[in-house]
Image: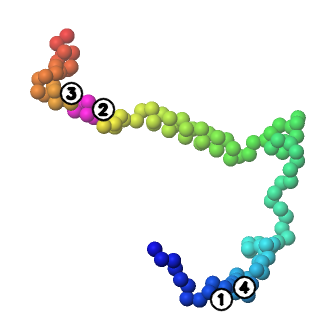
Amino acid sequence: MPPIRLSRPLTSLPLLTRSTSIPTHSFPTTRCLSTTPHRQSSHYDPPTGWLWGVPPGEKYKKEGWEAVWIYGFFGSFVAVGIAWAFKPDTSIQTWALEEARRRLEKEGILADPDDEVAAK
């Protein structure tokens, strides 16, 4: 394959200069986009150094939503576990085994298990 030839020398091609590049001015980073006034008190509790903000010797007071959340979270795990344990077997292998057994019993090759129970 022959080499590619340029119509003019590479040095004469216009180079990107600072004036043609992307503007370099920066946008203010402290600009707040919320509609609330800026001088409100902070909703953030400053760190106290204690685990969950409770000093040693004081008893933790539960909030109203905690019990509902805990019972709902772990209760849903129990409900899903029970539903998963009792779900029907819908695998293709189980269906094929039962279908083959039914066809063999119909043709008389395999004895019907219900007849053996009734004979006893």
Of pointers 4 and 3, the one earlier in the residue sequence: 4
> Residue 51 magenta-drawn?
no
Of pointers 1 and 2, the one earlier in the residue sequence: 1
Tag 1 near tag 3, CB within 8 Å = no
C-alpha span from label 1 to label 2: 77 Å
| Viewer-nearest residue: 67 or 100 | 100
Mark 1, secondary structure of its residue: helix
Of pointers 3 and 2, the one earlier in the residue sequence: 2
Amino acid tagged 2: Thr
Magenta region: 94-99
Q: Which mark is residue 17?
A: 4
Residue 13 against residue 55 in the figure, above or below: below
C-alpha span from label 1 to label 3: 85 Å
Tag 4 near tag 2, CB within 8 Å = no
Q: Quadrant of residue 56?
A: top right
Task: Report which residue position mark 1 lands on.
Answer: 12
Left or right position of 104 against 17: left
Nearest to the eye among marks 1 and 4: give it.
1
User: Residue 112: x percent and y percent?
Assistant: 17, 21
C-alpha span from label 1 to label 4: 14 Å
User: Residue 106: x percent and y percent?
Assistant: 13, 28
